Structures are given as structure tokens and as C-alpha cells.
Image (cartoon, rainbow, N blue to C red):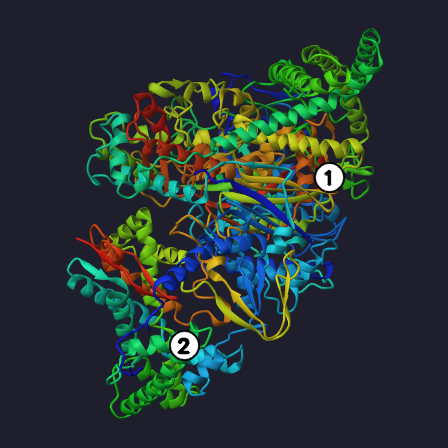
Amino acid sequence: MDQRPVSEGGGTPNWHLSAPTNTKAQGLVVSGFANLPTGRALFLEFGWKGVKKKGGGAWVEALRKVAQVTDADGRDPRAVAMGFTWSGLQKMGLNANALASFDRPFKEGMFQEDRLRRLGDRRGEDWQGTVIPGGPKWSGNTPLDDAAVDDEARAFDDREEIREQRIKTPVTVHALVLLYCEHDEAAEAWCEEVSAALAPFEVTVSHHLPLDLRLDKQGIAREHFGFADGISQPIPFEEGTVVYKDGTEVPKDYWNGVPLGEILMGHMNGHNEIAQGPVVADGIGNTSGLPEHPKGVGFKDLGINGSYMVVRELKQDVYAFWQSMRAGAAYIRERDPEGSAHVTTTWLAERVVGRDTHGNLLCPLGGTIPVENNDFGFWDRDLHGHGCPLGSHVRRANPRDGLAPTPADKQTLLDAANNHRILRRGRKYGKTISVPPTPDDVDRGLLFICLNTDITRQFEFVQQTWILNPNFAFLYDETDPLIGPKGTMTIPENPLRRIIDVETFVQMAGGEYFFLPSMPALDYLGSL
Amino acid sequence: MNALTSRDVLRPGKRGIARWIEGRVFAAMPYAFAFFRRWKPVVKFGGMTLTSRYDDVKEVFATDPVFGAPYKAKLDVIMGGEPFFLGMADTPLYHRDTDAMRMAVLPGDLPGLGQKVEAMAEAIVAAAPGRVEVVDTLVRRVTFSVLADYFGVPEPKGGDLRVWGTRLFEFQFADPKGDPALRADVDQIAPALRAHIDREIAARKVTPGRDDVLTRCLALQKKGVPGFSDVEIRTNLMGFIVGGPPQPPMVVPQAMEQLLRRPDALAGAQAAARAGDDDLLWGYVQEAMRFDPLAPGLPRNVLVDGVIARGTSHQAEVKAGDTVLAAFASAMMDPRRVTDPARFDPNRPASNYIHFGYDLHQCFGRHINRATLHLMLKPLLKRGNLRRAPGKAGHLVKNGPFAEALTVVFD
Amino acid sequence: MGMRQTTLSVALEVKPESFDHLSGLLDALRDRRSQNPSGGTGPFADFLTTVPAVHFMSLTAFPGFDYDPLFVIEANFDGAPGPFWAQLETAIGPDLRAFLRCCKRPLDHTGPLYDAVTALDSRAPIAPYLEARTLTPTVYHHGNRGMTRDRILDEGKLFLGTRTELAQSNDGGPSPYRKLTPVEIHAKLRAALLPQFGWLDQKAPARIPFTQSVGDYLRLAWFVLLVVFALSIPGLVLKSQLSWQWYVALCVGLFAVFTGVLYRMGKPLPGTATPTRFSFLTFFLRHLLVPVAIAVAAYVAIAATVSAPVWSWLGHKAFWPAWKDMAIWAAWSGASIAVTVAGILVWLRWLERRDASQDAPPVDPKMLREMARREDWIPQNHMGSVVLIKPGVLRAILIRVGHHGLHLLLRAQKAARNGYLGSMRTIHFAHWARVNNDSRLMFFSNFDQTWESYLDDFIEKAHAGLTLAWSSGVGFPPTRFLVKDGASHGRQFKEWARHSMAVSRFWYSAYKDLTAEQVERNYRIACGLRKKQLSEKEAAAWINDL
């Protein structure tokens, strides 16, 4: 879900980071590299056994020689971003105390038992329908931590030990490198160059995905189901740090503004605190490039201007989607032959998404809000969801002020919703399906990537409290019709709502939380 | 008159003013209980201690090492000295015997018993000319026929099991003062019933009968399971005949009377009967019984010095040899534990009822009761325009603790 | 009949040596509920019939840090406590007795009762002990006030019934409902459901009976009058000693000094400010000015009426002149309330600026994991927390008066009666109570959605009220005037809350897939269907809930 080329310079101009932050943060923070339509995601695995005492970061330096990680100070002819899993940092020999200073979700990994339940991927022993059959292919395979089992001996303790499950995937990912360039051939050659550079360090590409914007004739990037993608991003603000191209300050956007600390560690976040990041004790390795930590005396700030990158490989079944939409539309027509002239397969698919295929927001009485305009709430325009259904994907992904119980609460609810925004940087992978869609064996989908500083409050909240919440917006027993599990969807309409069945179209094939280091932090990790 | 050949199930009751006073005393009891619950939850009258609160009644029933069941002496008369589990304390023998009986009286029998009861009650009501007497004609006939058949005890030659069983029951449970005339009857009936069952056992050994409790006991005896000697089988069957079937003719007509007093409840029970919702119907009958249960309370003998309601403001000491009356009728009306006790509510939780006692000597037949009592009334309740018979016959008449007659009419 | 709901807790100190054992027993009871952690089938499902009063119940063992561990039974149920305890004892009596044996013998008059209940082989009923140890909540909140459990379940079934009817009527062909107007849809749906839901023909019981409402308003009014009286006492005393000129001069002078000090002290300490749209002045003008004026006027009138007979007797005056004297005196003292309040605020702010807040409350990762293991199986979750109460006279008064006022307000305020706290209606039952001889504050909540979203709601939507109720806790993030900042320090507040929590080892919900909002939605649908006919306007609103 990349920033769309069409919206670039559209409704709101792009934001930038001012100096010196623009040379500290990775370029991925400020840009989805829409000017570089081709890309590769290389999932790296470290081949060595155990933890490296020395030289664990040497491969990073070697990699940067052939694929320099892009910073945020402007366009480059090709771009690179990289992140590390907790298990990767551990193997590279990052100090144990520094490893302990990361946020809990990152330390525990996405595949911690309870987290998988909250994310809707697994309950108890069973993978859910929204995961590819047989379970996901890859993750960081984060080891169980000390909290996983309470085996501490205590006087007067006669309780049974409860041992947490360790959930493993066949492929282990220690780091992720994202390469962006203009042509596919160049990308292929570049990948080989990178693989060759990494080989001497026992670092291999254990999994890779070709990433693609693949603009259509109108210059719109569409995800595989055929909908314009990458619409509606949060707009960060921070005095002196977030600016427009001409250097003027980006004011707090009423509808989509979030404090920079929601995206970058070390900055003030939406909960009136400095977004926490990892630290390392001064003198453990080459810490000279890192700034002092503002609170921990004797510690360097490893996190500032870095971020957490949530990655999930989401496989899309395009044929099943349209098939299900066709069946749903047919069902509506069968139940309501006289009042359903407007109900087509596409009409239904648009209700599921909440926007039309061009990205315009659905409004009551058949109107739309053009895709360029992202300044709107739901309360005033579409309280009951007669245009954009209450449970549609876009309303679940960002309810704006739509959940307010009374008009007086609109502002509070909008502000609250903006404390749970994520900056999306995903791209699709796999061949576009034929028109009309026919079943094939092609692996296609979205490599979902988003940046946030508080994984629990941002990504996990969105996934659990909005996307997969069976009671979202006073609905009952239904989840996101697009990316949730098989179930029902309510389409409010006058006089009576319609309820249709929807199937599972999107399945998770792998995922993990990554640390997206700042440029100085990357230098530090390279020096390990 | 010979007790063995008598056809009068109940002995002649009090007459005239004495009967009127008895009726008033029973009618005043709920008010007395309310008074005692509030002001003197544990009260002593001479050697008898009355407990009226829910908590204390349950405590008395539950604390069998202190509050023993007082049944042994009279049981010995009935059983000819053979031990029956109702008279035992919490001993291994008690558990052996109750467990043994649970091998012969099986949960799987309950649906069948229910069907038989309902079918027979239906036949009686169908044959009645729009008017039926509930105590004897309906409930007693159904109960004794179905249960005696189930236990495998046939009618004695020249005698009537209903008379024998009820007379022994009265002696065992409803004769606190020890009426010599009653004792004289018992001295005739008890040996006769023992001999009658012995003969049946002997006969069954020669010609095996259908599948009933006796047949199962004999099969277990053959397998050498302890607790199934001839005498033990006889004692248990006697216990069942004496302790079981005499009770439904008391409580079921009483429940009917309570329903007749409450048109809404009666309508609800009839609706449940017609809809075939047996669980709800049970709820109605059980709730109706709460307003007039089997007895005001059950006595217990204090075996060792003890304390009732220890630690509370009304704690009271009891001495070995005292008698405690655990007034479960009062307990079921205690607003401290029973929500809005005066309201008729067929959906009350199980904890509101102590009909079958509690803990060790909780009624052995409670599952059979749960499966059959409401079905005795079901065919009647299904009838349209069910109402009291005109005049006195339409109101329940009691003879001491026993229901004597209640006539209803229907279309 | 509307039935009252009861919220209560029983807090018992645990023998430290038996704490782990108790935790194990609680886990075992929970496991017995069913193999599936989300509940449902299994031997414990009959809790629904054996304890029909209960909505939500939890059993928690708080580990001991400042005190010995604490075992808490938290229960929210229909009707009076007595029957509930009887039901609970019937359901899990032997387990309860085993739990009580892990608790310390109380040192007060309930000691003998404890002995009776926990003695080896004891068969004494447990309910009297639990009754004797029951705490009264200082504040509680009900999200679906006046809805009995059975009504919630019945209306939930009705909701599913409407769905089935609408989906399956003339299955396979055109739905007969689609051609109808809302009024007709209502009539047809009602006719279709009536055979199955006979109770639709009965009048809906009032959720909050009239007498209860009157009681709620009267209690609040009485409380406000008492507070006004208490605040006017300094004025009463001074006015009796001073001429009016001196009195006015003193009041104006003190008020000027206090406000000046407050202006300086009112600013947040560096680094503790959080942006907020909340302004005391706007709040006062918009919501408080009129009620305060009315309260003071009522106070003057009532005080004069009550004291006039005495004064007329003492001063040998007729009633009306005496009444007038008293009214003038009370009115003068009423004017001083502003000064008294300003003085108290100065005192409060002085304390707040010296409060030690805990920037990084320690959270035990193992405990956190045990909580995570039990959370998020169903759309509802549970939390229990205990915090130390800040010391000092003013704090002691504020926590009592503040909590009592908050409690009465939540019973009387329209939004709270409808289940809202601020702009959120995600709480089924929540309450605060003081434990450990009033030195600690306990909080329990049964809420919808995740713990994170619940806490975020507090931070983002109800931070003022929450800060008011919890800022008396030791270590709470820095606050201003009891309601500002505080909970707005998101992560710090969350860590503080987690730090104070214990694992909800046993937790039971009688309607696990119904959120508070859904209960209200079902209620609205049921109310509509109970009516034989809806007007066009009513039907248009009603049909949005289907």
C-alpha cells in the first residue's frame, strides 16, 4: 500500500524531514519510492551457529557497499531500506542489555502464542483460516524468553509449570533488505550482486519476493483485487523537523495529523511522551556515532530516528474474491429482485473495500469523495454507513470520527483514532491475474509493511480493535470483509440493511516485527 | 379390624374441633417460622431445638457427625433388626449399601419410569368423567403401581401394599409421640411384609422374573457382589417400599392445591404441560411444593455436644441427646438466601430447594421423583378448564401430615 | 419489576505461605470450567443455571509487595447478595472453603466465623463469613444499568431470532421484507417472532424504577448540600465575628491572594504538561455555574428554614425576621465558598507539585505473560488492580468525598445512567473499593475489547474522570488539579496500571459474546418489537439497529 503516484502533489503536498534528521532517518520513513516502480524484498538468514562475539555486523558493511541504505534527504536513482528481527540482532552479537531495551512486541516476536491470538492468526493449537494452509512459511523464529515459563524455585510453590508453546516456521528471517529500482532486469542483477556480496559472510537469502507498483494506463497503482492502493496516510508534524519541500513547516493536519513520534523513535508521540527506543551502554562497541540518551545516564540512544517495521506477507486469492462478490451480488438480487438493479459484482466489491476501484470514497446517495481529498470525517457525511459501509475495510482501518456516540464527541473520537495510525509502505508481489480472473497457481499478494513506534498501540490495535473486532462500530459477529476470515458483512441501506456471506481471500504467509534503524544506528550495527 | 387386610390407607384422623385446631396450627406455621427466622433463628422448646434459617438448616443436614438421623430404633422394628442405610451414620457400610443399590437402581431407568407414570396417569384421567380425586385415585395408584412393579414387589395376598407401606411410613416418620395402636398395626404388618418379600425372593430364584430391581439384585448376588444377601435384598426393598411410594401422594396433591390457589401459576403449568416442556413443568411442581413441602422439618438427634451457626450472632449450643428440628420448609422461605421467597417463580435455581434434604441422607429417590412427580399431574394439567370441584371436595383435606383428598373437575 | 444490580467484593488477606497454593487452586477451578479457554462447554457451563444471578465474577489473588497477598472475590449480579452467595456456595462451595483456608484469620470480630468455616471437616455454611467480609464499593459503574442477566440473554436470543427470520424468510426466493416500509417490516417481524418470544406481548419492565431514580437524585442533592455547607463553615464562623466590611475585605483579599498563587502554581511542572481541550473556566461556565448557583441558593433557603426556629427562640424574634437574619448569614457564608475552594485548591496544588510520581513502574514480565495468556479469548476482558493511597489529611478527605460524589454522580447523571463514561460505553461492571484498612484502593472492571484499547479509551476519551478517581494512588503520573495531565501520559499510565494489576485467574462472564453496546442494541430492538405498532419516525430509527 504505497503512496500513490496520483496523489503525489494532490490533496496535500508531501512532507519531508529537515536537516539534520533527514540524514539520520532511513528514506523509507519519508517515501514509498513511488518513482522506483520495481523492487525486491530479500529475507536474509544468518548461517552461523549461536551468537557472534565479533564481526556479526560485517555483512552489513559489505551489503552497503553494493546497496547503500537510503537516507531521507531526497530522491536517489535507486533506493534501499533494511530492518532486523530480534533474533537477527541477537545473532549479530548485539549486547544482551541492549536487546532487552527494545519494546516488548519486538522482543517477543510476532509469533508469540498470545500475540498470534490477538492478531487473529492462531488460537491455541490451530492456525486460523486467514493463514496459508500448514502455517506460515517464515518468521524471525524468536526464541522463547524468560517470561515464557515460570520455573523459578520458590518456597511454598506447588503449582504446575505452564510452558508456553514455541511456534516455529520453516524459514527463519534475521534481516530484511528492500531494494527499489526502475527496471526489473536491473533489479534481478542487483539481487545477484547483493547475494554474492553476502555469501562470504554466511548470510543467505532464505526467501525473496519481487515487489511491484505496476501502474496502469491511468497511472494508478492497484493492488491485486483491482483497487487503487496507498490512499490515506497519516501526516506527521513536529516543530522544526517536519517540513514541506520548500522548507516551510508542516502544520498539524486536522484530519490526519500525527506527532512525528508516532513514526520515529525519540520524538514526541501522541500520548505526550517521547517514543521509546532501544539503548546501548556507552562504550559497548563503537557507540561514538550515537547520541546520548536523554534519560539513561551513560547510555547511547540506539533508537532515535529509527522505527519498528511490521511486515506481513499476505497472499491474495483474487479469483475467490471476485467469485465471492459475484455470489454475494447474486444472492442480493435473488432476495430482492425489484430493489437491486444497482447491485453488481463490482458494486458489492466496492462496498467491501469502502472505496470505488479508483480510490474515491463511497458516499450516501451514490456520490463519492475524490481520492485526492483525504480531509473528511464519517460522522457528518455518512453516520450510518449508507455510503461507505460501517464494516468496510477502509472504515475499519481508520474509523476517523465515525465511532462517536454523539456529535459532541466527534473531536475526541477523531483525536483518539489518530493515536492509532500506521504509516504504510507495502507493495504487491506476483503476476497480475488475467481479466476476467481465472483460477491459477500463481503466488500473488501484498507484502504489507508499516512503520510505527508503539507496535501495541498502533499496528496491533488497528488489527485487533478495528480490523478483526467482531463488534466494531456496533456490528455483531463480523470482521473485516476484505482481509478477515470467512464470515458475514452488513451493508447498511434504506430501508433495511443487507447481510452477505464473504469468504477468506487473504492469507498470511509469513510475518515478523523488524527494527528499522536510523543511519547512525545502522553504522553501529555494522560495527558489531 | 385386622391391619393386614385393612383397605383404609390412612387411619381415621382427628374430628371436629381437634381437626380444626390442627388445620389452624399448620396454617399458622409459615408466620411462626418468619417470626423465628427474624428474632430467634435457633430456638429451644424443651428438648427440641428448632432451626429455621436456610444456612442453619443446611448446616444441620450437612453436619451428620453431630446431627444424626434418628431413624434407627424404629427401622429396627420394621426391618426386624437388620441394618438399613437410612439408619446408618457416615460409615463404610452406609456407602457400601447405597453404592450397591445404585447398581440396581439405574439412571437409565428414569425415562422409562416417567413414561409409565405419565401413561397410567393419562389412562386414569381419561377414564374419569370430568372429575378426579387427586390423592388416592390418581397419585397413590400411579405411584404404588409403577414403583412396586419397578422394585419387583407384588401385591401381598389378601393385603394392600398401599396400606402396608403407608402405615409403616407413618410409624417411621410421622409418629413422634409413639401411638400404641399404630405400633400394634406395625407389629403385624412389618413381619408380614418381610415374609412377603422373602417369599418373592425365593420364588424368583426358581422362576426368574422380568428386569426389575429385584431381578438385578439377584443377578448381583449370583456374581458374589457384597451387599446382596437375601436378607440384605429384602431389607433394601422394604426400605424402598416404606420410604418411597407413600410420599408422592402427600406432596403431589399439595402441589396441586398450591397451583389451584394461584391462577397464573396454574395457567403457566398447564401451558408447560400442553407444550410438552417437562423441565418447565417440573419447575412449576417443584416450586409449588416449596409452598407446602412434605413436612415442616426433619428431626435429627444430637450425637455429641455441638454448636449451630458458630461465629454468628445467633450461635447456639446443643447437647448430646437433644433433638434438632431442621425446618426446611422455613429454610426455603428464608429471604436471606431465597430471592423474593413469597413470589411463585418456576425458574428458581436448584439452591433454592431443600425438598430432598441435603448431603448424607439426601433422599435416595430424588432422581426418581425428579423423573416422575410432575408427570403424575401432566395429563390432568393438559385438560381444559381445570378447576376445583364445587364445595369442600375441591379443597385439599389433610389428615395430620397426610393429604387425604382433593377433587378437581375439568372439561 | 426492575431489579437492582449489586456490585461487591470480598477482600481477604492471604497467608503468604499459601499464596502460590491458592493461585494453583484458582487456576484449577478455571481449568475445570472447560478445556476451551473461551468457555462454553464443559462441566462449568452449568454455572449459568446454578448461579443465575451472576453477570460477571472474578477470583483474583494479588501478590504481596507492600502488604501480605490479597484474595479478592469480585461479583456483579442481580438482586440482593444473600441469594447470590447461596447460589455460589451450591455451585463451588468446597472450592470456596479451600480458598478461605489459604486466607489469614481476621483479627476482628469475624475471627470465630472464620474458624467455623475453615475448621478441618467444617460443614458450616460459607455465606455468613463472606457476607461479614463484604466491602461496599466507593464508586461503581454499570454499563447496562437495570438489565437483568436473564433479560440480556433473552433479548440476545431475540436479536439472533430477528437475524434468522430476516435471512431465511422465503429462503431461496425473494425476501418478503425487502418490499416493505420500516413500519411494515416491524409489524411483519413482530408477527413472525411472537410465537417464539411470547414475552414480546408483555410490557417491558422499567430498567430503573421511578423510586430508584428519585433516590439517586435525592442522594446527590443531599450530598451537594452537605458539601456546600461544609465549604461555607469558615464563612459562617468569620461572619459571626466580623463586621460585613471586614468580612468582605478579608474574603476579597484572600481570594485575590489564592488566585494569584494558583495562577503561578497552576502551570504544569516542566515535562509533565499534556495538551488538552479541557478548560476549567469553560467547564465551570458551561456545566457548573448554574448548578452551583442553584445549590448555594437551596442551601441558603434550607439553612435559614432549619435554623430560624432556633434563632427566633434564642433571639426572641418572630419567625420571619429570624428567617431573614439566618438567610442573610447563610448568604454571606455562601459567598465565601469561592474563597474556601480556592484555598483548598492551593493546598491541593501544593501537594501535587510535591507528589512523587513513578516514571517507570516495575512490571514483572512473567506476571504480564500470565495475564496475556488469559486475555483476548472473547470480546470481553477483565482487570483487577490495587494501589496504595497517597498520605495526608487532604488526600484522605478528597478520596472519600470525591469518590462518594463521583459515585452519586454516576448514578444520577444521564449519560452515566445510559452506560457512558465520557464518550465510551465499553464497561459492563466496574468498581472501586478501599482495602487494607483504607490504605489501598482496589479497582475492578469487566470491559469490552482489549486491555490496550480499554486503557487507551481512558487515556484518550475519559482521562479527566479517570485521573480524578485514580490520582490518589501512589505513583500515578503527575496531575494538575486532580483531573488534568495524569492519565494523558499514555505509556506511563499504562505501565502504572499494569504494575498494579494481578492475574485474573478465575473470571466468568454470563454473556461472553455480548458487548455493552450490543446489549443496548438488543434492548432497543426488543423495545421496538414489544410495541404493537411503531410510528413512521420510530420505525425509521428502530430499523437502523436490525
Q: Nearer the viewer, residue A393 or C293?
A: C293
Pick whichever, A32 or C150, lies toward us. Answer: C150
Tag 1's secondary structure? Answer: helix
Q: Is residue B70 above or below residue C385?
A: below
**Is there any visible trace of residue A270 in the rendered image?**
no
Q: Residues within 10 Å of mark 2 (few under 14, many from 20)?
A: many
**Pointer 1 local density, CA inside 10 Å: few below 14, some 14–19, many at least 20:** many
Mark 2 — residue? Answer: B171
Q: Quadrant of residue A21?
A: top right
Residue A282 — which label?
none
Q: Looking at the image, is mark 2 or mark 1 nearer the viewer?
A: 2
Is residue A140 toward the left or the right of residue B153 in the image?
right
Discs 2 and 1 carry the same chain letter: no
Q: Position of residue B289 (x, y in %)?
A: 38, 58
Give the residue displayed 34% in from the left and 84% down from the top: B189
Task: Please name the amino acid that badge 2 sits on.
Answer: Phe
Q: Which amino acid type is shown beneath numbered disc 1?
A: Tyr
Corner quadrant of residue B138: bottom left
The x, y position of residue A240, in whole percent, is 69, 18
Cα separation between marks 2 and 1: 97 Å
Q: Quadrant of the N terminus of chain C?
A: top left
Which of the chains bears the disc numbered 1? A
Query: Is residue B64 rendered to the left or right of residue C223?
Result: left
- Which residue is at a point 69% across and 22% down the rendered structure image? C228
Residue in the image at 31% along x and 57% along y: B256
Label 2 marks a residue whose chain is B
Q: Is residue B306 visible?
A: yes
Q: Position of residue A153 (x, y in %)?
A: 72, 63
Query: Residue at label 1?
Result: A524
Give the residue furthest to the front.
B17
Q: Position of residue B402 (x, y in %)?
A: 36, 67
The C terminus of chain C lies in quadrant: top left
